[in-house]
Amino acid sequence: MKRFLWLLLFGALTYTISSCNASATATASNEPSVVQDEADLLAALQSAGATTELGDSITQDFFSVDGRLITINGTDGIQVFEYENAEAMESDAAQVAPDGGSIGTSMVTWMDAPHFYKAGRMIVLYIGKNETVLGLLEKAMGKQFAGR
């Protein structure tokens, strides 16, 4: 009888652990896909059904690297800044004020609402309010770390 109780307890414990693992896996799959670089970002956007176009390079005095303009579903205003490594990206990201109104010692007057995202070794700046674009960027990169 004691052996039966131990087997029953072991079975219940095994079932509980496997249920927790299944729940954790389901939760993880609902998390945003985290991209590392521009190629990953473009692939994530396209796999979500977005159309993308690469544009010209862009320089922002407040970031230590040049960026590239991209268009998502015909919407302009997306700037991608890819760094050598995550540490260099984090160094620039740390300079961005929570509301995006200043970056380091630069005060910025935006034409529209700024949205800053970071993932892997890049920062993406979207200046605009297109909800579809915001949703696509959040899905690919996670919640914005600064902006309005």
Image: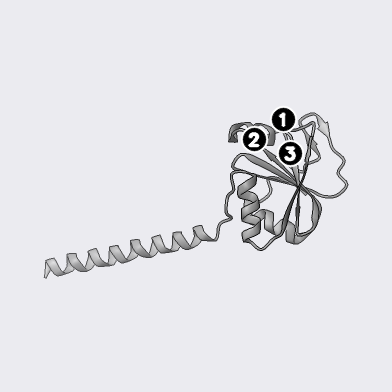
Q: Amino acid at mark 1?
A: Ser
For the residues labelled 2 and 3, say whether their Cβ atoms are less than 8 Å apart.
no
Q: Earlier in the sequence, mark 1 or mark 2?
A: 1
Name the residue nearer the viewer: 72 or 137. Answer: 72
Q: Position of residue 104 (x, y in %)?
A: 76, 30
Q: Quadrant of residue 16?
A: bottom left
Q: Residue at x 29, y 63 (%)?
A: 14
For the residues labelled 1 and 3, say whether their Cβ atoms are less than 8 Å apart.
no
Q: Quadrant of residue 46?
A: bottom right
Secondary structure under badge 3? strand
Q: Amino acid at mark 3?
A: Gly
Residue 19 has which mark?
A: none
Local crowd size for mark 3, using a 10 Å CA cut-off: few (<14), some (14–19), many (≥20): many
What is the basis of the colouring in this image?
A: one colour
Q: Residue at x 68, y 58 (%)?
A: 136
Task: Say whether residue 142 is visible.
Answer: no
Q: What residue is pinned by disc 3?
A: 67
Name the residue nearer the viewer: 105 or 60. Answer: 60
C-alpha gap between disc 1 and disc 2: 9 Å
Quarter occupied by the N terminus: bottom left
Residue 83 has which mark?
A: 2
Q: Amino acid at mark 2?
A: Tyr
Q: Position of residue 117 (x, y in %)?
A: 68, 46
Secondary structure under badge 2? loop
Name the residue nearer the viewer: 34 or 43. Answer: 43
C-alpha gap between disc 1 and disc 3: 10 Å
Q: What residue is pinned by disc 1?
A: 64
Q: Earlier in the sequence, mark 2 or mark 3?
A: 3
